[in-house]
Image (spheres, rainbow, N blue to C red):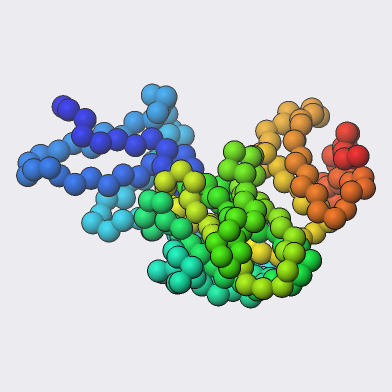
Amino acid sequence: GREVTSNDDAPGIRGDSTLTFTAPEGGEYFIELRDVNYGGGRDYFWNLRIGGNPLVITKRIASSLPQVIEREPHNTAKWATHIALPCGINGRFETTNDADVFQFTAKANQQITFHTRTRSVGAGCDVMLRVENAKGELLAKSNVSAADEGVVTHVFADSGEYRLVVREATGAFGSAAFCGVEATEAAGFTLSLDSEKVEAPVSGSFELKVNCARGNYKGPIAISIPDLPELTLTNHVIP
């Protein structure tokens, strides 16, 4: 009756669970499944998959930009993957403290934004972005404690070769630790939400926090939601 291993919510598959079990010795074992809150009833159904092969969760993240798929090894400047901007990058962290290095060419006074997608596409990882010059000196990096998924914008003073280092910030790795990065010419501003899902009462109201990262546009920004004309927006102009 001694518990050997357990799992509640697994990174990358939202509220579902997964675990890998290696029997320490031959014999009989039991697996127990229950609702985390001990609930039950006709709506509490489940499906369990058991097998010798791990569940592969990795998926490619769609983008309208030309796509680059990482090729290991490329965790150092010597083995860096060359990319042409603008582009989208798909990758996965294979081991703990894994880092992916990409090399690119930038022009003088060119402003580039690198934007990460992880949690919004179901990935179980957090990413830190680091922009370096050819000598490996830090030029800019993302704020891992911010609410966004990892964004960094930099204006390159000189034309030349530069590197983007993509690193998992918490030590997560495996099939659920995948991410996408879009590298584009910086817009005048970018908007993001702390939460992308809201449960609101009928005829009621709700709040969404909108974060604004400004590029070269410093004027007012009016927010609208054209696909939902039945919504009435208030406090929707960022000065």
Is residue 229 in view?
no
Asked if 164 appears above or below 39 in the picture, the reply is below
Is the residue 47 above or below the residue 71 in the image?
above
The quadrant in which the C terminus is found is top right
Q: Residue at x 77, y 52 (%)?
A: 190
Tell me the residue at 38%/24% (across/down): 38
Q: Is residue 84 left or right of residue 38?
A: right
Residue 45 x/y as whole percent: 41, 38
Where residue 1 sits, quadrant-wise, is: top left
Quarter of the rendering containing residue 199: top right
Closest to the observer, 34 or 52: 52
Residue drawn 89% across the image and 48% down it: 218
Q: What x and y, as percent, mark residue 9?
A: 42, 38
Total labels: the figure holds 0
Would residue 118 appear left or right of 71 to someone viewing this image? Answer: right
- Residue, far top: 38
Q: Position of residue 31 (x, y in %)?
A: 23, 37
Instruction: Let me know if residue 144 appears in the view.
Output: yes
Q: Who is closer to the viewer here, 119 or 152?
A: 152
Identify the residue shown where x is 76% and y is 40%.
Answer: 210
Front residue of 117/53: it is: 117
Q: Residue furthest left?
A: 26
> Residue 130 in the image: x percent, y percent?
58, 55
Give the camera-side residue of 116 and 122.
116
